[in-house]
């Protein structure tokens, strides 16, 4: 049997992203999302989540690209000169490898983020992270400890098949980044299992992050392996507004169109793929 979680990242980052995610859930195949506790539109996202109880909501733990939830003086090693979290995962990893990151502060910040989501009345279904930093050795152990503390049952393992391209033509930097993160994810899987956390067996969406067009989504669906898979997506409304706010070159509207496509819905039905969320993967 084939089971599939379609998880939309960056819930709370921008109201137009929030609206796109909800549209993809109510009119399409999104079953799950990941909320960013320190993001500007967090409260907007939390209110939407309360009105859509069938949408699973995890925490998009954030160590890069944002502001801390903790008081800055408590997590100073995580911040740059502007008082913000590192701009990207290469910047974080460089600082981390040079022993510039204190793991006690990583745990402090990530626990504060989870507490903020709990305080918003959200039942957390799983943990993942912005730019997949939760699988970095050292950070991973803090995340597993937090999952146990807050009774969170599952986490993302972003181990995309190294030879999977699905017709997408990535840059060399993307391929290298995907390869490194996928290898770390494979190492993280064993530790997550030992800690008693559930995780999908298969993962797609890293290489084509922000570019999940209908054709690529259909190729993933057509070749979906047996068992439980997760597809990571990034839908949103109004590319003009979002591309003004973010310089990532994402195609939010294109992804939303794919996720609400009748052809995608028909293909899921044709392959007898059961849509689930992290909230009910233990029942599959």
Image: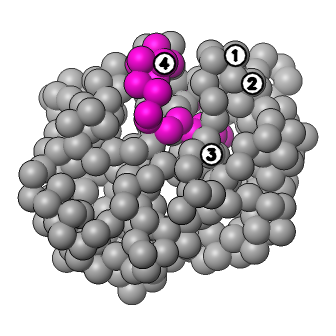
Q: Earlier in the sequence, mark 3 or mark 1?
A: 1
Q: Estimate how packed mark 1 is, as few (under 14), some (14 to 19) or many (20 or more) residues with alpha carbons within 10 Å.
A: few
Do labels 2 and 1 touch, CB within 8 Å? yes
Residue in the foreground of this view, choosing between 172 and 260: 260
Please give the label number shown on residue 119. Answer: 1
* Residue 55 highlighted magenta (yes or no): yes
Specify whether residue 109 is in view: no
- Judged from the image, the secondary structure of the residue bearing numbered disc 3 is strand
Q: Estimate how packed mark 3 is, as few (under 14), some (14 to 19) or many (20 or more) residues with alpha carbons within 10 Å.
A: many
Quadrant position of the C terminus in the picture: bottom right
Residue at 26% in and 38% down: 24
Foreground label between 2 and 4: 4
Which segment is the magenta one? 45-67
Residue 155 location, x and y as percent? 64, 54
* Residue 11 highlighted magenta (yes or no): no
Disc 4 to disc 3, C-alpha distance: 17 Å
Task: Give the residue number, with chain letter if any, for mark 2.
Answer: 115
Q: Quadrant of residue 271?
A: bottom left
Task: Give the residue number, with chain letter if any, for mark 3.
Answer: 126
Q: Estimate how packed mark 4 is, as few (under 14), some (14 to 19) or many (20 or more) residues with alpha carbons within 10 Å.
A: some
Do labels 4 and 3 touch, CB within 8 Å? no
Do labels 2 and 3 touch, CB within 8 Å? no
Pick out the residue farthest to the bottom.
163
Disc 2 to disc 3, C-alpha distance: 14 Å
Disc 2 to disc 1, C-alpha distance: 6 Å
């Amino acid at each position: 049997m084939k089971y599939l979680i379609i998880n939309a990242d960056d819930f709370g980052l921008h109201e137009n992203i929030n609206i796109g995610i909800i549209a993809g859930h109510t009119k399409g195949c999104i079953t799950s999302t990941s909320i960013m506790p320190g993001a500007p539109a967090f409260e907007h996202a939390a209110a939407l989540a309360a009105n859509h109880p069938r949408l699973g909501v995890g925490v998009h733990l954030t160590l890069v690209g944002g502001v801390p939830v903790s008081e800055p003086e408590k997590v100073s090693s995580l911040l740059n000169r502007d008082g913000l979290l590192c701009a990207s995962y290469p910047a974080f990893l460089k600082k981390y490898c040079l022993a510039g990151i204190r793991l006690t502060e990583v745990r402090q910040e990530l626990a504060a983020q989870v507490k903020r989501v709990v305080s918003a009345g959200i039942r957390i279904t799983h943990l993942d992270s912005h730019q997949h930093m939760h699988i970095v050795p050292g950070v991973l152990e803090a995340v597993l400890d937090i999952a146990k503390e807050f009774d969170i049952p599952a986490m993302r393992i972003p181990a995309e098949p190294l030879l999977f391209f699905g017709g997408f033509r990535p840059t060399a930097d993307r391929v290298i980044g995907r390869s490194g993160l996928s290898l770390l994810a494979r190492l993280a899987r064993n530790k997550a299992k030992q800690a008693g956390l559930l995780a999908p067996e298969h993962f797609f969406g890293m290489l084509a992050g922000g570019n999940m067009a209908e054709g690529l989504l259909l190729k993933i669906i057509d070749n979906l392996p047996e068992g439980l898979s997760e597809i990571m997506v990034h839908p949103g409304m109004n590319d003009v507004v979002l591309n003004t706010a973010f310089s990532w070159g994402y195609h939010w509207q294109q992804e939303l169109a794919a996720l609400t496509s009748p052809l995608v819905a028909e293909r899921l039905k044709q392959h007898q793929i059961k849509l689930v969320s992290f909230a009910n993967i233990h029942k599959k």
